[in-house]
Amino acid sequence: MASDAGAASLDGIDLLRPLPPEERAALARQCRWRRFQANEQIIDHLGETRDVIFIAAGRVRVLSHSAAGREISFDDVDAGGFLGEMAAIDGLPRSASVAAVEDGTLIAFLAPKPFRDLVTGHPDLAIAVMKRLCRVVRLTTDRVMELSTLGANNRVHAELLRLAKRGRAEGGAAVIAPIPVHADIASRVSTTRETVARVLSDLSREGLVERRPDALVVRDVARLEQLVEDVRGGA
Amino acid sequence: MASDAGAASLDGIDLLRPLPPEERAALARQCRWRRFQANEQIIDHLGETRDVIFIAAGRVRVLSHSAAGREISFDDVDAGGFLGEMAAIDGLPRSASVAAVEDGTLIAFLAPKPFRDLVTGHPDLAIAVMKRLCRVVRLTTDRVMELSTLGANNRVHAELLRLAKRGRAEGGAAVIAPIPVHADIASRVSTTRETVARVLSDLSREGLVERRPDALVVRDVARLEQLVEDVRGGA
């Protein structure tokens, strides 16, 4: 446990923004605080804890592992977000593990009972927690649809399109920086690193993707979108 | 619209059980009521409505279709349940369609604003809605893991095991009645009817499954469980 991680501030947590500052400060003192290094585990899916975690600094990743050791990742959450609310709400075992992505990731742990009292006591917080759960359902449902209807190649195209849309636009192109790690793309669309490498190299040969020293560039986002929509059929 | 579907009772809806009877009756009068025949669409995923639906009688199915017309089903909900809360909470488009499974399915439609006021005004209802969303996340996440790590044959085994566990135990066997429709199993595990038929016929040849006139019998649930766990690796 890092010594600089006493009761730090929860002022940057989006969910808690509607609270008066003094209530947020009191909540911060109720939390257990800890700092993590990259790849260090924050929540073990086999663990007994049911705490909610607030990400005060850094970035975390939600992931599961198959028995064969394949990593299936679900979502990255940046500073300002929260995670672990499902076990706090329904008391059931963790559905996945959570690990730090960046060094110095600062986490506040809040026990389930005070979390439930907090959200049920503030209608806007209750709605915000429900909205977050809805977002997770929607993302996961989209993934079921993709896994059910698209082949691995097209799932890589779809993931690349998502990254492009979050990237920096340059005319009809999109700049994705830093260059995404093949293994990360693979674990997000449930395929192998080799498949990701092959699809990217095919797209590069076709001139649709260009690898710069510090970024991956999708040179024609509309054409990539067309490629994905053609297979998905505009569904 | 069926004429016998005036303001019927919401007394059988689990979510609303904590409410005083007179509040439940007032809510029933706020709803629009309609009766549906089997296969009739209740919520169109392309529609603009954001209502929550309470299933007062009958049974409904949540489903999506791929562009190629393949049906991907998500969940069946019986009388006493509710659906459609996501669009009511986050205001975003429907994630799927809902259709009646049984004739005479009786539905109460509640507009998004009164639904949100209802759940935020009652902490136990807010927690119940969150728990339901958590359940959907957990089911959908399990499905992503199965689609990512199991082949189609093993996904059929896993679905058969789920049906067996909900069925009637007979010693070490389980009786699944009525006989599940191949197309329903196929749409729940994202494969084809042909694959389901082939897997069931293989299991039948091995003596693990027996088809009776009115039921499908898994003769050794422990052995089926072993079959699934061996592949999943006990994860």
Image: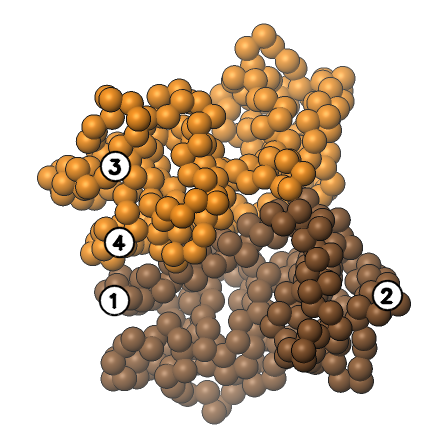
Chain colours: A brown, B orange
Q: Which residue is at the far right? A: A205
The answer to whether marks 1 and 2 mark residues whose Cβ atoms lie closer than 8 Å is no
In the depicted view, which residue is nearer to us: B144 or A28?
B144
| Marks 4 & 3, CB-CB < 8 Å contact | no
Give the camera-side residue of A153 and B4.
B4
Amino acid type, label 1: His
Label 1: state its secondary structure. Answer: loop
> Which mark is drawn over residue B113?
4
Which chain's residue wears label 2?
A
Crowding at label 4, few (<14), some or many (≥20) Cα neighbours within 10 Å?
few
Position above or below: A95 against A221: above
Say which element carries label 4.
helix
Q: Amino acid at mark 2?
A: Glu
Mark nearer the viewer, 3 or 1: 3
Mark 4 or mark 3, which has the lower sequence index? 3
**Viewer-side residue, B161 vs A129:** A129
Residue A132 can be seen, yes or no: yes
**Residue B64 at what x, y percent from top left?**
55, 40
Q: Which residue lies at the image location 63% right of the left edge and 65% below the top edge?
A: A162
Q: Which residue is mark 3?
A: B32
Position of residue A64 measured from the top left corner of the image (x, y, whole percent) = 62, 58
> How many C-alpha atoms fall within 10 Å of the one at disc 3: few (<14), some, or many (≥20)?
some
Secondary structure state at the residue bearing disc 3: strand
The reply to whether dot 4 and dot 2 touch (C-beta < 8 Å) is no
- Where is mark 2, residue-wise? A206
- The circle drawn on residue A122 is 1
